[in-house]
Amino acid sequence: MKFPHNGMVAGVTLSAIVLASAAAFAAGHATLMVEGSDQDVSGGSVTASKIVAAEDGWLVVHRTGDDMKPGPVVGHAAVKAGENMDVTAPLDESVASGDKLMLMLHGETGGMKAGEFEYTLGAKEDGPIKVDGKLVMTVISAK
């Protein structure tokens, strides 16, 4: 491609193109994460303070134990691609003080309907997101 002598391409400078490309690359490769802390769940919900997702998906609340393996799902909430703050998931069953909960990022793929949570433990539909083979999650204790 030949560029005019003034460095303009269809009214856009080459530096603007490079900056936009770099920003798009960085956004697409943000560190996926789920952050949360021990909290009172007596109100029937649990909140992740911050979730970073590459695509639309789900905050899924699993029971877990000392083995730190995901157990049954006890709640979920939708998340959007990008940074999500203070995502609250209603709990489908009571959680006792001292119970451990795994707040995990799940995708929105493989199911029959977009926008409908279809995961069951061990299924592929709307399943867990992994980075380098590791689940994107954090474990908290209910108070």
Image (cartoon, helix red, strand yellow):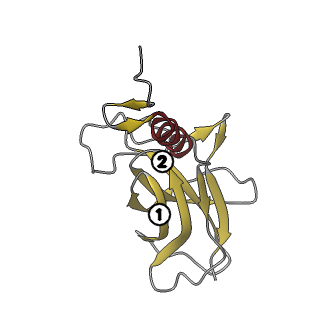
**Residue drawn at the location 66% of the way across and 76% of the way down:** 38
Secondary structure, mark 2, is strand
18 on left or right of 39: left
Mark earlier in primary sequence (1, 2): 1
Q: Which residue is mark 1?
A: 84
Secondary element at image label 1 = strand
User: Dot 1 surroundings within 10 Å: few (below 14), some, or many (20 or more)?
Assistant: some
Q: Residue at x 40, y 23 (%)?
A: 4
Is residue 139 found left or right of 17 in the rendered image?
Answer: right
State which quadrant residue 140 falls in. Answer: bottom right
Left or right: 43 in relation to 112: right
Q: Of the residues shown, which amino acid type is indicated by label 1? A: Asn
- Residue designated by label 2: 106
Callout in the foreground (1, 2): 1
Image: 15 above or below 77: above
Q: Nearer the viewer, residue 63 or 21?
A: 21
Q: Answer above or below: position of 103 versus 48.
A: above
- Residue 1 locus on image (x, y percent): 41, 13
Q: Residue at x 51, y 74 (%)?
A: 46
* Disc number for residue 130: none
**Foreground residue, 81 or 137?**
81
**CA distance for labels 1 and 2:** 14 Å
x and y, in percent, of residue 98 in the image: 68, 77
Identity of the residue drawn at 62% across and 54% down: 137
Q: Position of residue 126 (x, y in %)?
A: 40, 42
User: Looking at the rendering, in which quadrant would you find the C terminus?
Assistant: bottom right
User: In the image as oriented, which residue stretches furthest toward the right?
Assistant: 66
